[in-house]
Image (cartoon, rainbow, N blue to C red):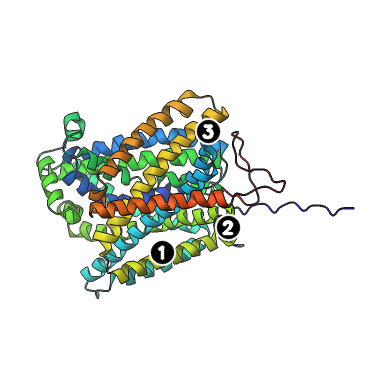
Amino acid sequence: MAAPVESPAPPARLSGTLGVGSIVFMVIAAAAPLTVIAGTIPLGVGAGNGAAFPMTFVLCAVVLLLFAVGFCAMSPHVPDAGAFFTYIRHGLGRPLGLGAAFLALATYTAVQAAVYGYIGAAINELVTSFGGPSVPWWAWTLLVVAVVGVLGYRHIELSSRVLGVLLIAEIAIVLVLDVVVVARGGGAEGFSTALLDPAQVVSGEVGIAIMFAIASFIGFEATAVFRDEARDPQRTIPRATYLALVVVGVFYALSTWAIVSAWGDEAAVAEAGADPATFLLRTFENWLGPVGLHLVTVLLVTSLFAAILSFHNVAARYWFALGGHGAFPGACARTHDRHGSPHVASLAQTVLAALLVVVFAIAGLDPVAQVFAWMAGTATLGVLVLMVLTCVAVLAFFARSGVDRRVWHTRVAPALGLVGLLVCLALTINNFATLIGGSTGLAVAIGAVLVVVFLAGVVVALVRRPTTADGTDPDNTDGVARRTPRENV
């Protein structure tokens, strides 16, 4: 008698009971609201469409909400963690899906590296402002890498609690400024109305304004990455996605409007253009005094830390996904016996981040003007490409499978979102040299690296095609979600 065939072990799964609030905290933390207020708003106001920049956040939020409609409609039919990777694989096939996974990992690693550069410089500036010693930025950054590595190794709930505390603090200080400005009726010119004037919204360098605004939302799409760790993913993921977008969009638009009102339209543009690095700090000092200035300086560092931790968790889950898919060593798909975390994947991301910091330090790169600018620009371009591919995947998936007949959710909204994202992508490519603060040659080189990373994923998918025990192709082509022992996403 033949021996019975053992059933394959079930794929490793992450565990957790994250609710809507916890996931929203993590994705908004990734957006780093205070960092956006301090870094992006001065650039959008000073170099973009001026005092009307608050409306740019609203327009970008609308485009991303249209993207989210199809994203969330497809979510119940793709019940696996992995976000971009999973959606694109189910909609456009495994080669493009794995190419997207490689690109996503590179993108999130780039944005994490960007913030690592910024936080090293910010901590040193904070310490020296209180009379402490000046230390090379990379020393502070490597310390942060170690702390993030410890938190990423443990259960996701710990990271969620840390991010929740830090996020509340950074949002609270900005809201205090907003309330004070509104309570006093704005600055000398009263409240700004430029955001309500269509002529001013499209004035100046509106392309640059849109480019900086869309970059401020990076991270919201990571809600789907935490699917396995959500309490009720069918309801939690869509709610968290919509809520994160609305909260971030309203917060950015309201706070930018309050800051512009605090200065007055012309003065805000002049001040932001003259010295964007200190624009927010001067605003807080003028309206909240020295105490407000010290608080926002400290909270800017915690905002950066929250963003790094959130992006670390996202990147680690891509390592985990690629390990389960067979593209990376299988050890990356292991979960910790006690923490239920992707501990090997988290360690891999920690080592990669540390290596990048060492390389940047040896190369003598400036942590803000070069590391932050180059890596943040790379991430913006990568995320836009991934969202465009996801929109196409959503349209293709529903057209082929027919599992959802709602026209708005499966056709109209995704198509409108695709058009909006293509416009944002075209503007970003056109202004990419400005975004990274470098030359056209550097912009072309970064774009080429992203293309090579994407193609590497496609090649791996074609060379290492997985099959089930009976030799059949496990890829989903009919709208029915399936798993194999080698696939977690």
For residue 1, which numbered disc appears in the image? Answer: none
Q: Earlier in the sequence, mark 2 or mark 1?
A: 2
Residue 87: image x %, image y %?
51, 41
Residue 341: image x %, image y %?
55, 58
Q: Residue at x 41, y 64 (%)?
A: 353
Q: How many marks?
A: 3
For residue 353, which numbered disc appears in the image? Answer: 1
Residue 387: image x %, image y %?
41, 41
- Does residue 275 appear anywhere in the picture? yes
Q: Earlier in the sequence, mark 3 or mark 2?
A: 2
Q: Tag 3, which secondary structure? A: helix
Q: Which residue is mark 2?
A: 333
> Which picture quadrant has residue 165?
bottom left
Q: Few, some or many C-alpha atoms within 10 Å of disc 1 (few <14, some 14-19, many ≥20)?
A: many
3D distance between C-alphas at marks 3 and 1: 35 Å
Q: Tag 1, which secondary structure? A: helix
Amino acid carrying label 3: it is: Phe
Q: Tag 2, which secondary structure? A: helix
**In the image, farthest residue toward the bottom:** 133
Q: Earlier in the sequence, mark 3 or mark 1?
A: 1
Q: Nearer the viewer, residue 413 or 454?
A: 454
For residue 397, which numbered disc appears in the image? Answer: 3
